[in-house]
Amino acid sequence: MTTAPTPTAAPTRPLTDLRVLDLATLFAGPLAATMLGDFGADVIKVEHPTRPDPSRGHGPSKDGIGLWWKLLGRNKRTITLDLSAPTGRDALLRLAATTDVIIENFRPGTLEKWGLGPAELGAVNPRLVLARVTGFGQSGPYSHRPGFGTLAEAMSGFAAITGEPEGPPTLPPFGLADSIAALATAYAVMTALAARTTTGRGQVVDMAIIEPILTVLGPQPLWYDQLGYVQPRTGNRSRNNAPRNTYRTADGAWVAVSTSAQSVAERVMRLVGRPDLIDEPWFAAGSGRAEHADELDEAVGHWIGRRTRDEALAAFEKAEAAIAPVYDVRDVMTDPQYRALDTITEVPDPELGPLRMQNVLFRLSETPGAIRWAGRPHNADTEDVLTEAGLSPSEIAALRATGGTR
């Protein structure tokens, strides 16, 4: 058994008294649990005894150790239980009795089939918040379909508006819908816990991954409902303002320009030597500027194309106009603003040594979050956690003997 790292003395974490069981995989549910753990919750990751969490094998690895897991599994203690086995079920119920939150993402009906549905869990702990994260929710005609973030990115309308006008719908090369759903799940859990302080009771959170991404896409349903308007693909351009695009610099780099504010749009056109366009009647509103994006892009692109990235950035900053370099991860790791915020922070790890990863999501002045340890080995904390739940050594041995744990 690997001993859990002992964190150094730190300010009180706001969620220190919260216990979370993470039964979920890939990726929204586990990421929501990570967010809670970052602010002090005691998160216990429950994995199958012989089938570790799939994220341990996702993406690149080093020395046979999955790097994605080091991020997703941080601040979590790891145990193994076969929830489909009677002994594993009974152990989970023992844990649930002293748990505040369970996060799961099995297909609807799976927990019920194992005797671990809301009724059974609520019977041992009426204050429990059960967060159920699935592709399509707990009800409806699609509820029993396999659900992944890619399907949500397609069905929400995101892919339909992403890409060049004449190109195909475009999916993101990362877990966008899952990540948005993780944020929404963490918010939903905290809302349910706040309600518990008034009602004294827990409740079920029904999170469908297809919904949060639809929320962040803005007023498209409202536009369609009231105007019959369907937003098309526009590449890097916006139908709401212009100039808004990426532009190549003289040294082969790329920068992005935004002119959401009218005053910024005017500063940009003065900077690039086209103040005459400001006096055009259509320039006074973002939608009017968007209709003349070709002309505005030509002016901005021509000016930027004759300067290096550093020259363009410096000139825009002096003019108080909005611009940013287009980064890849190498730039992110060295950017002075990210460094000042400690956005990418170093975490010691007994398996791989120092690791650099994204820090906690936000900074609190009085009760900050922290990364206490990176993702731990499979089954590292089973004995400790089950002992805390009141299982005797003989009960743990019997659980192992029946395959309920390792």
Image (tube, rainbow, N blue to C red):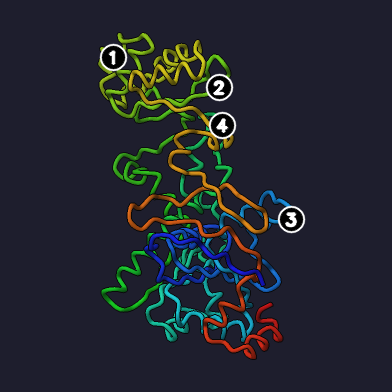
Tell which tag, 3 or 2, sits nearer the viewer. Answer: 3
Q: Amino acid at mark 1?
A: Ile
CB atoms at circles 4 and 2 under 8 Å apart? no
User: Residue 168: which quarter of the image?
Assistant: top right
Q: Do the residues under discs 3 and 2 have CB atoms within 8 angstroms?
A: no
Tell me the residue at 57%/64% (across/down): 5
Q: Which residue is mark 3?
A: 64
**Amino acid bearing label 4:** Gly
Q: Where's residue 372, x and y in %?
A: 51, 59
Coordinates of residue 272 in the picture (x, y in percent): 38, 12
Judging by the rendered image, the residue that carries numbered circle 2 is 253
Per the image, label 1 sits on a secondary structure element best described as helix
Q: Please state which of residues 85 and 97 is positioned toward the viewer in this rendering.
A: 97
Q: From the top left corner, tell me how far across and down residue 196 is, in percent.
A: 31, 73
Number of the front mark, 3 or 1: 3
| Circle count | 4
Q: What residue lies at 33% left-to-right and 78% top-to-bottom?
A: 201
Residue type at mark 3? Gly
**Residue type, mark 2 in image:** Ala
Q: Check disc 1 and report the residue beneath it.
A: 278
Task: Using the rendered view, name the quadrant where residue 261 is placed.
Answer: top left
Q: Earlier in the sequence, mark 1 or mark 4?
A: 4
Q: Image height check: is 174 above or below 184?
A: above
Where is residue 359? Give x, y as percent.
Answer: 48, 49
Of label 3 and label 2, which has the lower sequence position? 3
